[in-house]
Image (spheres, rainbow, N blue to C red):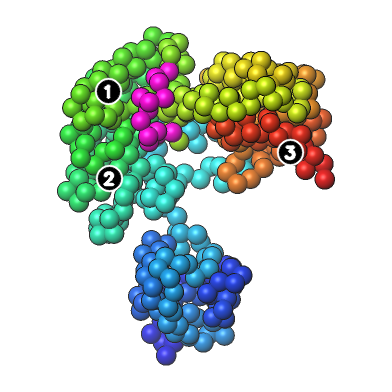
Amino acid sequence: MGERFKLRRKHKIAAVEAGSIAEELGIQSGDLLVAVNGQAVEDVLDYMEWMSGDEVSVTIEKSDGQIWELDIEKDPDEDLGLTFEQPIMDRQRACRNRCIFCFIDQLPKGMRSTLYYKDDDWRLSFLMGNYITLTNLTRHDVKRIISKRISPLYISVHTTNPQLRRRMMGNERAGEVLGILKEFERAGISIHCQIVLCRDWNDGAELERTLSDLWSLRSIVNSVAVVPVGLTKHRHGLESILPFDAESAAKVLEQVERWQEMCRSQIGTAFVFAADEFYILAGKSFPSYQEYEDFPQIENGVGLIAKLVHEFDEAIGNYRGKGAPVKEFSVATGVSAHPTIKAMMDRVQREMGAAVHVYPVVNRFFGESVTVAGLITGGDIIAQLGGKKLGAALLIPSTMLRRGEDVFLDDVTLEGLSAALGVPVVPVPVEGSELLETIANLDKILGDRRE
């Protein structure tokens, strides 16, 4: 019986959830998933699709070579409880571009190897919201996206000018973007787009052309984010790119806001949104909370501050007059968010009676032009906050840490930072009510840590 499975792609099972269907059936870590419903599983999308029914047939190869054919009845969408050695059940697709603005190419040497990996996998775009460039899609990939109705996808467009896109991305296939997007349009595959704007490259008239082309695809384009290029001090040997300043940032905002006015008048949505950093650079007030609609580009730093302030304003009344249990603590943030966080903590001092020290951390690791909190390193915090008044604890935005880990980009751990500063360090989600909830329960949080 095993002969017909020899040439099939098999997926090694790394773990089996306790109490799951898989455990009850005797499936074990180290076993191989050979097929589902008699078909080889190409990747996790096949697996998810075929597992969504109430009846499923699973072929398992045991460590001794036995083949088990298991017919399973389960609740719709109930998982078997399997974790695979490769999470997407396939080789992850790497980026094939040489973008002039690539942030990874601007990292210093000597960091952990995983930070230098350039992901460009359309499956992770669908599953996790990662932005992809489309330059490594095969015809098979395009057919699978369309046949499986994979939506939405998150696309790094940057420019729709084929020659300019090829030059900016260092890939001949980069010029195919509009053709692929039009295929998606015919199939009804919805997308979100980002434009990493490089001054004197794809701004001005080129940005106008790109927005016009994306507007023509508005039946599938849910939103467009315009974000400024991130430039570190580690650009030796790379293409020259000017950073945005107050004047050039203001011009971008004027252009985006003109587009927003036209789009709202025609389809009732802004369609295109500028990153918070443009408003900070231009010295302009942020749009209102309502103008960001359903915050479709929040992960791109679009509307993050307006959302944070709105959530804080909505929740502060619940804590007025109650008093903070910890009477002195500190907050570390990036340079760009400092004025906003300082104003919020001034209100905490007035309303809750706590002394709060708010410190902007200058980014020495990547360069002072990098001002967002999410790229602050533990080493910079230690160097700049050592010896400062910190009170009973230091609060930091959780975006400073790698997702799911207690470690900064420079490999300084949360525990190491706390030891170096001599106070507990408490990560807080970038959410206004969560921030206030943390402050209101800081004594309990610190007590639990001591235990």
SS category of the residue bearing label 3: helix
Residue under pointer 2: 190
| Up-down relation of residue 427 to residue 241 (above or below) | below
Bin the neighbour count of mark 2 within 10 Å (Cα to Cα): few under 14, some 14-19, many 20 and up: many
Q: Which residues are magenta?
A: 286-298
Q: Is residue 34 left or right of residue 362?
A: left
Q: Secondary structure at mark 2?
A: loop
Q: Nearer the viewer, residue 251 or 54?
A: 54
Residue 398 percent coordinates (x, y): 61, 36
- Of the image marks 1 and 2, the number of the one nearer the N terminus: 2
- x, y percent for residue 396: 65, 30
Q: Quadrant of the C terminus?
A: top right
User: Are circles 1 and 2 on residues that touch, CB within 8 Å?
Assistant: no
Report the mark closest to the observer, 3 or 1. Answer: 3
Q: Residue at x 24, y 25 (%)?
A: 264
**Up-down: is 284 above or below 78?**
above
| Camera-side residue of 400 and 77 | 77
Q: Which mark is residue 162?
A: none
Residue ranking furthest to the top: 247
Q: Of the residues shown, which amino acid type is indicated by label 1?
A: Gln
Q: Residue at x 70, y 34 (%)?
A: 441
Secondary-structure class at tag 1: helix
Q: Is residue 390 visible?
A: no
Of the 4 image quadrants, the one containing the N terminus is bottom left
Location of mark 3 (residue)? 445
Q: Amino acid at mark 3?
A: Ile
Main SS type for the magenta part? loop
Q: In this rendering, would 167 be left or right of 441? A: left
First-in-chain label (3 vs 1): 1
Instruction: Verify whether residue 257 appears in magenta.
Output: no
Q: Which residue, given by chain and number where applicable, does mark 1 sit on? A: 260
Badge 2 or badge 3: first in the primary sequence: 2
